[in-house]
Image: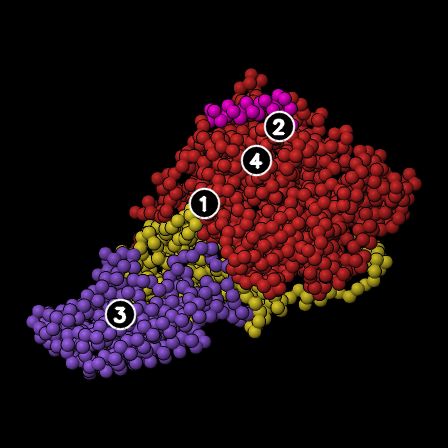
Amino acid sequence: MTTLPDRPADARKLGLVIDLDVCVGCHACVVNCKEWNTGSDYGAALSDQDPYGPDVSGAWLNRVHSFEVIPEGGEIVGEAGEARIVHFPKSCLHCDDAPCVTVCPTGASYKRAEDGIVLVDEQKCIGCGLCAWACPYGAREMDLAAGVMKKCTLCIDRIYNETFEEADRVPACVRTCPANARHFGDLNDPASAVAVMVAERGGIDLMPEQGTRPVNKYLPPRPRKPLAAAAAEPDTGGATGFFAWLDGVLDRF
Amino acid sequence: MHPAASIIVFTTFSGLGYGLAAILGLGLVDPSSVAVKAAYVASLGLIGLGLLSSTLHLGNPQRAWRALSQWRSSWLSREGVMAFATFVPLLWSGFAAVVEGRIAFVAGALGALLAAVTVYCTAMIYASLRSVEAWHTRLTPLCYLLFAAAGGALAAAFAAVAAGQPARPLLVLALALLVAAWTAKAFWRRRLARPGQGSTPETATGLGAIGRVRLFERPHSTENYLTREMGFRVARKHAAKLARLALLLGGIAPALALLAALAAGGGALAAALLGLALLSHVLGMLTERWLFFAEARHAVMNYYGG
Amino acid sequence: MSEPYVALSEPVADEVRQTTCYMCACRCGINVHLTDGKIRYIEGNRAHPVNKGVLCAKGSAGIMQHYAPARLSTPLLRTGPRGSGEFRPISWDEALGLATDWLGEVRRKDPKRLAFFTGRDQSQSLTGFWAQQYGTPNYAAHGGFCSVNMAAAGIMTIGGAFWEFGAPDWERTKLFVLFGVAEDHDSNPLKMGIARLKARGARFVSVNPVRTGYSAVADNWIGIRPGTDGLLILSLVHELLRTRRIDVDYLVRYSNAPWLVVDAPGTPGHGLFARDAEGRPLIAERAGGRIVPAGQPGATPALAGRVALDDGRAARPSFQLLAERYLDPAYAPERVAAETGIAADTIRGLAAEIGRVAFEEAIAIEQEWTDMAGERHQRFVGRPVSFHAMRGISAHSNGFQTARALHLLQVLIGAVDCPGGFRFEPPYPKPVEAHPTPHGKAEHFGSNKPLSGPHLGFPRGPEDLLIDAEGRPNRIDKAFSWDAPLAVHGAMHMVIANAHAGDPYPVDLLFLYMANLAWNSSMNTAGTIAMLEDKDPETGQYRIPRIIYADAYQSEMVAYADLVLPDTTYLERHDCISLLDRPISEPDAVQDAIRWPVVEPDRDVRAFQSVLIDLGSRLRLNGFVDHHGHALYKDYADYIVRHERRPGIGPLAGFRGTDGTRTGRGAINPRQLERYVENGSFFSAHIPLEAQFFKHANRAYQDFAVRMGFFDEPRPVTFQLYQEILQKFRLSAAGLTEPAAPEEHRERILASFDPLPFWYRPLEEAAVDASEFPLHAITQRPAAMYHSWGSMNAWLRQIHTSNALYVPAAVCDRVGLADGDWAWVISHHGRIKVEVARTEAVNPDTVWTWNAIGKRSGTWALAPGVPEARRGFLLNHLISELLPRRAAGRRWSNSDPVTGQAAWYDLRVRIEKAEPGAPSEPQFKTVEEPPPHRPRAVELSYGQEFKR
């Protein structure tokens, strides 16, 4: 079970595409994910410890980090020398070569043959935490109340849910994102909207050197064109010239 | 990585236990004396203590039996399977030694082999993780194996000297293993000190093409499971001090004691000295293991500014 | 081995109920899924016009807000000293009895000694009506410390402002310029809009000292120095005039550019519009120089030149004054670069881009329409440049003129209510003349008498000020006095200070709703707390003798109340998002909405609006009781349905008429709320395409507005680039007209009431030594918190458990600060100790932090010493409600001199390294938690109960 399934080359790879060009870091996806998954039928609730005290913390399946990027040494695509903030949502990337799956001693962690979603069967999870160690992305968090490992399920209880309207059969984070920064689909279908997006915008893998072959892709911020480059027209005289021009315009009415 | 006491105790004591069991299993000590019988019992006790300790950090220990199922892919599962498998010959040879006062060589040798495999599996749990660059090297299982063997040889030598048996080859073996272990560890540490070849905030975010990347704000203000588990940081100066302490307690002091015992050629004083050396070695190994975790940086910290 | 079974098709919950969110002021539609009466899940309502299905972090955390232990659960009567938090629970009978006694006594004696102020509520149409019937002049909501500059400047210039008055044409705009909005009004629509325009390849420029939130995704970020936006905008105006990128036809048709301004210095008419006997403004015709009333069909108005009026006085078109002013080289990009901190090239580039997009990328919608002069047009021509701004430019002491400048810029390029530009949302545009004047002069009220009109309105000149014969303020907050003549939203932030000082008079009863004035909603928080605690040594009475406070949660203010009326949560009550109040219309549709109790309260709490109605009938106020003295309304729901402001016009515009088919105007429909609930708790009526643009001058729209009941007659708007009302105040200040401004006010009014937008240095900056306080300190709204409303929420508080001060890298290096160090931040008013974080994505002269994360220990049902209290902090402690004293003069309020808008973002500071480690300073005594006391949860596993 813990071994990765043999999947045909054209098997579906469901995943997310995250657009860093429009994510404003509002945490909508973070909280809606928590809200959906804490009460959904899949697995234990996402608990919070010391919820009203000094050491508050909890299990979350999706978190938004923010980074300051200082254009030094890299290829400068914004205004030269200006630091920028990039908001960076992160959840399970449903890797093709998921190290979290193969390290699991109990078979609780598995990758679905059908669509590539990586799940934890909480009935089997002993809460050893090794899968969280194996994941370089920090996509797995132990639920301290239930003692089992939690992770993004790609809202498997939504995306195939026949009691939902078609439009709602997407992960909660995608449905709620106000900035349309999150997209869901089959990354292995070159005709899918997500695959097209990745191809057009140069979608990237996180930490390719880890050899995990993540399914989720990130769209980098679009190149920026400085305002100073916009050419201004030459001066056409002071106030006097202006009123003469104005006269000419009014004459045409 | 967070240096969890349960895991440090587990790897230190089970390593020592397996090392001792292996040396005893190879029949290098005569099991007729009480001290050696005690060593057999101790080896099994240490292994048991270590394994018990390893279940302490589980969220659902009642399901721990499931961990035996995934030996095809999981080093942790293999370790569990091997730990159980190793018990069979070790109990057999232990029974022969303690109850019958004889060496069951086949069982002992098989036990020694399986003990080595078990320690190797333990080490490979860490060494297989690409996400922790410091661990992801063949040097990790080498260190684990050599430390287990050195500790085992030292403990066996202590038992032998305490039993009044001639123990020169054992003392020499322990000394050689200690030197080998710490040499391997020195290479391991040298690798650790090298600038990272692995993941950076730039590769973690894919934003390196724009510029230098640093964390601006964590996703949540307070610590979470990931930062508690993987965000442990130890100051470099502090770590260097501890590394020297580990070498002193775990390597130099026992080595000096072994040399002294060799020079003395046995006796109560040598036995006492070796006892202290073993204690010192254990303390040194606990320090070494603490550092093994504390100094290892997990790739996820690229997302947390660590 | 096969994969485990996964249940893929379980329904969400037993039932879904649709209502309106209230986790911020955005008012998105939500689907509340319930299982066994408990909230299982809250998501955005796809059919809702505001959020179209999306929902932000706050909205998604509604569960934790609704079930927060910080909810008040019973009426409370204070037993310990103020601020201790010692209360005893009392019954509603006792609470309402006490409130009625206290309110009744004041009303009989002197109704102005009640000050009734409400915070971020959305029921101002009711609360204002109640206060009017009670008869106190002292009522306002929180606009005075929020964005009154924006609202006042917008109404007075174009007949509407941003957010609730209008929005960018997201589908068509090609250049969007956002001034100073971090993450708020209008939160979800802005995010959706920015994403949509970026997807189309439109350019998004953000002008903001801090590059987080929306600024982080801007195509261009202009890290302006705080308080200089007005100068930047006027430099853009300079560039647009210089390069002839203005829409002359639009100006002639829709603005007062051709109106003649009298040029007679030293006389009472100077600077006012020349008018005919009927009061109509006059223009000069280009051909022949005839002087005729504005708006005559066929007239060809001149925009420049000097003419003689019939009475012999000289006059010039206002546009000439305008053009001469902004063509002045003082506004050239090079000249403003140093002050604004923006490179001249960037300013010139932005102006060029605005001009290019407006005129070279103009768009057209082929749809015939008729303007108010009767002229038929073949199409709507759009200049696809749009702007948006809120507190960032508003909360400065020069914010009114800055907001005016921004509207001026929009009009100059012809980008107001056109395709691709900024577009009005009904019932706006609404000219000043369609607004009431303020009421609250002594003759407007008396013992047991209602106020003769609404409190808040637009003075047309000094004659409408609420002052007595000596020129002293009538209102406790000094709104509509010489201190703040155009304080059209009141000045709530001054109430406690003024009431404590007895200036202009003391009050007997302070009645507050949902306004955390003992903490993040006050300047000088520690001083405000001291004022609330201060007693008159002679009587032993508190200086502010009685305080009634209504809130749903245990905020910092609760401990200062004598009587606490516990409110419900937003999921437990009726509410009405009304066109009479703060509408949620879209440019293409008239909209309003409701909330209704989707869950029943499990505590002894009552919806404040229903309590207010109950108090109204207990006090036998007009409008709340019939002539027999019987209550007119059972509760707020009943009021929403049956109250009529004018015949046929009630709080809700939808489903009117006995059969529910009428919109806008119509008889009372007893089933109206049911119809709203069936429709997802909102109502939307589309504006015909012919009426969707140029609403200010579109005949079809004006007719639509009359049909809807916004107005009883068409109310077209002529954009007031030159604002005559402001000039009237200057004439008073010059002593040329009556009432003349008192001597001490004259300099300030002459300096700030310029009828053409201009820029001046923010008052605090001008008053302090720049070398002593070299940095600006501002706050930004975090996306996951709305003011103080998030710390009681177990999920949201994890995102912002404490705040640090973000300090520019160069300042860090200069002062020797690194991440995690602690520093003293010092203003002319005080100092605070805070944790420091380094940043480079900020204006180099600006330090900043997240807004309202710091909390007082013991409040919000959090454990004492939580990070919010121990590490978190407020900048409020550094901000004085008064400006530094100038030589021998009086201390003016720290506000915009025109509107009284609180100047939160004018703060100037310096920073020094402090001894390491928490706590932040100042720290306050831990407040005791009000009864009933319950053990604090050590762990939550919310949702475990729903597992099947």
Q: Which residue is mark 4?
A: C533
Residue at disc 1, secondary structure = loop
Tell which circle, 2 or 4, labels the residue nearer the N-terminal end: 4
According to the image, what is the colour scheme of the structure? by chain
Q: Which chain is purple?
A: B
Give the residues drawn in magenta, as a range.
Answer: C92-113
Chain A tint as drawn: yellow
Would you identify the image quadrant in which residue C818 lies?
Answer: bottom right
Q: Are marks 1 and 4 on the same chain?
A: yes
Residue C232: image x %, image y %? 71, 57
Image check: C528 left or right of B60? Answer: right
Which mark is on residue C538? 2
Kind of residue sitting beneath label 3: Leu
Residue C110 counted in the magenta span: yes
Please report, as a chain letter, where disc 3 is located: B
What element does badge 4 sit on?
helix
Mark-to-mark CA distance, 3 and 2? 77 Å
The reply to whether discs 3 and 2 touch (Cβ–Cβ < 8 Å) is no
